[in-house]
Amino acid sequence: MTQVLERLGFQVDFPPAQTCCGQPAFNSGYPAEAGTVARHFLETFRGAEYIVVPSGSCTSMISHHYTDIFAGDEKMLALARGVAPRVWEFSRFLIEVAGVDDVGARFDGVVTYHDSCHALRELGIKDGPRKLLAKVKGLTLREMEAAEECCGFGGTFSVKFPEVSGGMARTKIDSILKTEAGTVVSIDSSCLMQLQGVIDRAGLPIRTAHLAEILAGT
Amino acid sequence: MSSREVVLQNVRKALNRAAGLLPTTLAAPRLRVPIMDRNRYLTLFGQNFEKLGGKLFFSQEPGEAAPVLAELLQGKHAVASNAPFLTTCGVTALPQVQSGFTEREALRAACSTADVGITSADYALAETGTLVMLASPAEARLISLLPPVHVAVFPRSRLLANLDELLTVLPNPAEQTSSMVLITGPSRTADIEQILVRGVHGPGEIYAVIVESPR
Amino acid sequence: MTGEPSETIQQTLSDARLQLAIYSATNRLMTHRAGAVGPDLLPEYQELRNDANQLKKHTIDHLDYYLELFERNVIAYGGKVVYCTDSQEVADFVLSLAKQRGAHLIVKSKSMTTEEIHFNERLEKHQLEAVETDLGEYILQLAHQRPYHIVAPALHLTRYDVAEIFSKNLGVENEVVIEKQTRIARVALREKFLRADIGVTGANFLVADSGAVVVVENEGNARLTSSAPKIHIAVAGIEKLIPRAQDLGVFLTLLGRSATGQPLTVYTSFLSGPRRSGEIDGPDEFYVVLLDNGRTKLLADPEKRQSLYCIRCGACLNHCPVYRKIGGHNYPWVYSGPIGAIITPQFHGVLKDPWLPFASSLCGACAEVCPVNIEIPKLLLKLRSEVTDAQRREGQGGMERWAFGIWAWVMTHPRIYLMLARMGGLFAPMLPKVGLLGKWASQREIPKVAKTSFHQWWRERK
């Protein structure tokens, strides 16, 4: 992601104190604990002009749910509201802030795109990544039937209901196999981790790759 | 305290509302009646009616309807409603047709053994191929329900565009009748293995005979 | 862990035939819905959803007013309204009426509300026969099973299951052709319709300005149920109210399309009171039972009362990847899928089935298709924190809360976090696969960790 952004002329900073957006605790029913981590995030990124995130779910956690966590705390609520317009999922940053869809990337192969749920449904990210992939030289994008179906990760869902989570991933992988693509791309590493885990367990020749990886390739 | 009082009190407590409080104003219902040439209604109705498995006949004038019915009723026995339009079209005069029932038990007995139930229709909706029937002294409920075949004979002028137009011309059906039924296609189910079967409890075959007539 | 889900989930997942049945049935319903609400056929779809949401919000926010308005109009047209606080009161009312009228046979059309209150069982205890007449429900009644799906109750059964159920219970030959099975049911039930003393239906909508009950269906059994017997009783939750007959334009347009892709179901009945003077047939008596049974509890919560907007279309079930894997019977109550997941804890208390709000990946597909815009994922999140709070009060769930407390501490101490992350990545593949790691590993390989961490890469390039 850094390589792509610098290639486009942006000055990239990486605050080393960053850890997590707090989503795992929030989704597990512990908003107070999530709030502790969210505070750290807000402190770490205070003053950043654009916060670019290689994850749809983290982005939506910050821009949509921080206001839920801090609903009772006026000061924090104001900070939460202030950060929302500054936080950008990576592909959306490229399309809407950098204003580009061609980042000069090259990738030889057939790729299929998985719409991660938070990006699709909470952030409305659907066409952006596809536009970016379309401009990658050598890349063929083949849509799978169930592109919008959940991969089954869901954070702690993956370990609280492992069989259901695994079942959902296998259904998704069936769909991927039908496209005969060698690589499945997403803008969320958690989806990719879930899918790769099941792919490797099944011994299938499919690679998962984050959009940033593809776009960094030249 | 009666159950009525308990329930209403629980509702008010839950909403923090005092008894007798009026609600805030509600926006007028948004009814979407398409701007369409009325001549299109017939074609549109026909398309949608037949897509559902219904069969449509068109008669240029009331006198032409009875022969169509006679053809359909060959070898069959029918019960017809008391709708004046059926008499106008000569349907009730056909030999296989019994009509003029005013008594519930007799009507039900006749409908239970009839092959065909013939009614008029109070309205028809073009966009969905729907027949609209209001129960009345002229139209009993069971005629369009018990026999395995239902035929509706009605003038073209009763065609409306869609449900929203029906609700526009009839904003208060309860004032007119105890039962308004919208019939959209033959009875069907897909309850077993998602396989479509027609004629479960209601009629499995429906026909519409639309007559070009002023009323 | 916040409660263990049932072992039958594993059974359902391993049953390949059942998985295929669930998947293909829901896929069919999804595809039909998509066609019917697409921008070419229904360009005003999003607008309609907002209208429906606003109408429901208004009605629910002023429910006492609309209940009383509805009641006045039912009475004005010759009907009666019976308020019931719980399931037994409904049964008591019907039993008492049946006794007064010498009624022995009841026919019923499909109603999730009557499933909720175990209507048939309560009546059977008093030798009053209530026969289900919807084909799917009829089959289930004979088989003593509960519905698998709000709209397609028997989707888990094959024609061979049905053949066996019919031959065992109806004394007919083993018939596997579906059309013939339908015919068997038609004949058997026709006799019941014409002999029944009382017809009991549900109600999809209660129309306040008309005192009317609206029932939608495809088979014709609800029409027969409400028109053949001399007494019609409609049983409905108090949340079914809508203000005006003209609001049906919005609701009927959304309901059929969202449920099965049909612009209108085959029969839509708008029933108001017993037959009017001069009408030849129809019931002589008309009752509407307005049921609370805990709905006022949901009503009391301003954030979660939107759960009551539900018009029972089933779209959320069809689109839920979890429902599509575990099926309807693995939910603890008669209402399954996403809507079941949010209302069950509210009716029964969050600690009864504490795992339920967590049985979701929060993908949001449900909210995307809900015709009345219920924010299901948001309510699931709210319920999750209510579960953990309740557990804390009961002295349960301490381990998990402690774990997240530690986690939050680590996440606010970046150097510790980095060290642990590095170690975790390196050592995880070697650890025994127990606990959480075991759960991950039961389905997936452990993720491989990059040789150089991003932090290292960043430091090294400066």
Image (spheres, grey):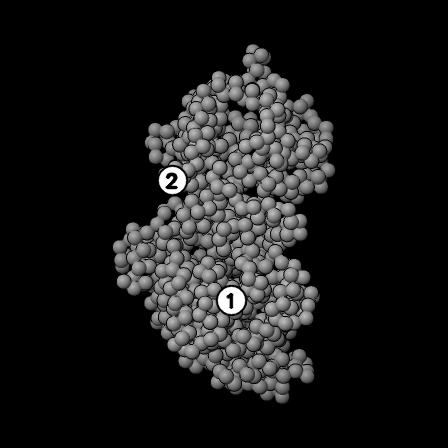
The chain containing the residue under callout 2 comes to: C
The chain containing the residue under callout 1 comes to: C
Sequence order check: which comes first, mark 2 or mark 1? 1
Q: Is residue B143 above or below residue A187?
A: below
Asked if residue A55 can be seen in this view, the reply is: yes
Q: Measured from the top left, where is residue A163 in percent x and y?
A: 59, 41
Taking depth in this image into account, of C432 and B144 the one nearest to the observer is C432
Residue visible at 59% across and 87% down?
Answer: B93
Q: Is residue B104 above or below residue C21?
A: below
Q: Which residue is mark 1?
A: C109
Q: Amino acid at mark 2?
A: Glu
Residue visible at 45% across and 65% down?
Answer: C122
Q: Measured from the top left, where is residue C2 in percent x and y?
A: 47, 39
Residue visible at 45% across and 67% down?
Answer: C125
Residue visible at 54% across and 68% down?
Answer: C133
How far apart are labels 2 and 1 at the CA level? Answer: 42 Å
Q: Is residue B13 above or below residue C267?
A: above
For the residue carrying disc 2, how many other residues have a C-alpha within 10 Å: few (<14), some (14-19), or many (20+)?
Answer: few
For the residue carrying disc 1, how many other residues have a C-alpha within 10 Å: few (<14), some (14-19), or many (20+)?
Answer: many
Asked if residue B176 can be seen in this view, the reply is: no
Q: Is residue C239 above or below residue B152?
A: above
Residue B11 figure quarter: bottom left
Taking depth in this image into account, of C447 and B134 the one nearest to the observer is C447
> Where's the N terminus of chain A, which quadrant?
top right
Q: Measured from the top left, where is residue C298 in percent x and y?
A: 38, 50
Q: Of helix, strand and loop, which one carries label 1?
A: loop
Left or right, B15 with respect to A170, comes to left
Q: Amino acid at mark 1?
A: Ser
Q: Which residue is mark 2?
A: C394
Q: Disc 2 or disc 1, which is closer to the eye?
A: 2
